[in-house]
Amino acid sequence: MSRVVSRIAWGVFLLMLAGCGFQLRGEASVPDSLKTLYIQGINTQQDTLGLQLKRALVRNGITVVDDYQEGAAIFTVLENRYDRRVLSVASNATVREFELDAWVTFKVTDDKGNELSDVQRVEASRDYQFDRNQILAMDEQERVLREDLNKQMVQSILRRLSAIK
């Protein structure tokens, strides 16, 4: 009896999940002209954003070359910036909340130098509470938030690359 109820419950759950439009994030479909890509303007070995970008591109079936090769499209990072701003201050003039902003400006050209996309800017931001009594924890929280910002920007870049015709 309990096995039947369990199966019915799972069946109802799966129908509801399918009905709500939930779908696992699949590969980004990029044009054939971007299947081999050279990234310049950011270090793909040590820079956090560059490393995450390279990994995401490879996961999506794009060959990322370390040195420029004939026939490879060029992904040029023009600007990669982070900024931290004070959002709120307590009555005793101490910072209570910060906002982290990150943005990347890039363009994509083909192997002949023809622009495949205009200069584009991808942005992300997060805010967080600051407690000056827990400085080490706040540093770690900021590091984790920067990683989240990078992940969000990489996903936005992949969506932009898939929109290139």
Image (spheres, rainbow, N blue to C red):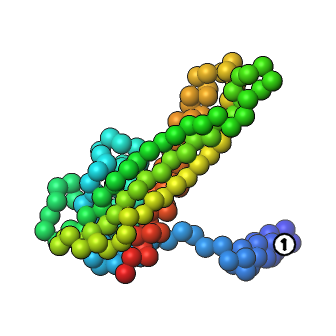
Q: Quadrant of the C terminus?
A: bottom left
Q: Quadrant of the N terminus?
A: bottom right
**Residue 146 to residue 10: above or below:** above
Q: Residue at x 37, y 59 (%)?
A: 106
Which of the 4 quarters of the picture holds residue 98? top right
Q: Residue at x 42, y 63 (%)?
A: 120
Percent across and percent down for residue 40 are 26, 54
**Residue 55 to residue 12: above or below:** above
Q: Residue at x 61, y 21 (%)?
A: 135
Q: Nearer the viewer, residue 109 or 34?
A: 109
Percent across and percent down for residue 75 are 30, 62
Q: Is residue 39 left or right of residue 50?
A: left
User: For mark 1, what is the residue?
Assistant: 5
Q: Is residue 67 left or right of residue 90?
A: left
At label 1, which amino acid type do we have? Val
What is the residue that sits farthest to the left in this orientation?
A: 70
Q: Residue at x 34, y 53 (%)?
A: 78
**Residue 88 to residue 102: above or below:** above
Which of the 4 quarters of the picture holds residue 22? bottom right
What is the residue that sits farthest to the right in this orientation?
A: 1
Percent across and percent down for residue 102 are 51, 47
Element on which disc 1 rests: helix
Q: Nearer the viewer, residue 64 or 19?
A: 64
Which of the 4 quarters of the picture holds residue 6? bottom right
Percent across and percent down for residue 8 are 80, 76
Q: Nearer the viewer, residue 96 or 23?
A: 96
